[in-house]
Image (tube, rainbow, N blue to C red):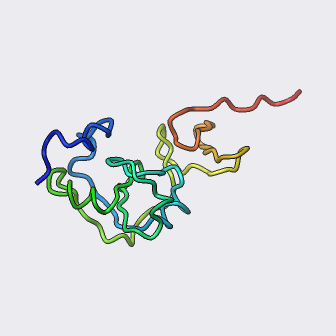
Amino acid sequence: MIEKDDWRLIVIDDPERLKNIYINPTDGEEISQNAPHLKSCSFCLDSVNDNMHQKWFVTEDLSDCICEECYNDFKDMFKWNLLDGWDIEWFVKCPQCGGKLERTPYEQDYIYFCKKCNVLYSENLDDELDLPSEKT
């Protein structure tokens, strides 16, 4: 049984937001290809790229991924609703409008752009970026 003071619960920024949500099974390869902003397990921080063929779980909104071990350890505590994995919408949603973000290569990384909001986001969606100014 998992203890309430398990170190993995301290790592996650707001554990309450992950209670009673829908979770899809997938694998690291699909995550890496379709949701590259998800780089590690939200609980134990295991790297997706180091465990490509392991079973993983992603939240319905693609905000978090969870390794198989953490899923098994926390599924009862968080009361996750397991989906079948066939209906994963592999696009990243804009934090402002919920629309589809376009993934674009930029320097060594990728950025996301929302046409509706006209906003650029960093690859991990944590930061809004300044749009390049048009030359006149």
> Which residue is nearer to you in this view: 74 or 80?
74
* Image quarter (top left, top right, bottom left or bottom right) of the C terminus: top right
* Image quarter (top left, top right, bottom left or bottom right) of the N terminus: bottom left
Relative placement, left or right, of 74 versus 29 is left
Position of residue 22 measured from the top left corner of the image (x, y, whole percent) = 28, 57
Position of residue 46 measured from the top left corner of the image (x, y, whole percent) = 40, 53
How many numbered marks does the figure carry? 0
Relative placement, left or right, of 128 versus 38 is right
> Which residue is nearer to you in this view: 57 or 52?
52
Position of residue 33 measured from the top left corner of the image (x, y, whole percent) = 56, 63
Which residue appears at 27% of the width and 41% of the height? 17
Which residue appears at 63% of the width and 37% of the height? 118
Position of residue 71 measured from the top left corner of the image (x, y, whole percent) = 26, 59
Which residue appears at 51% of the width and 48% of the height? 99
Above or below, comparing residue 29 to residue 60 in the picture? below
User: Which quadrant of the figure has residue 69?
Assistant: bottom left
Which residue appears at 27% of the width and 56% of the height? 70
Outermost residue toward the right?
136
Relative placement, left or right, of 114 versus 95 is right
Relative placement, left or right, of 72 versus 35 is left
> Which residue is nearer to you in this view: 128 or 36?
36
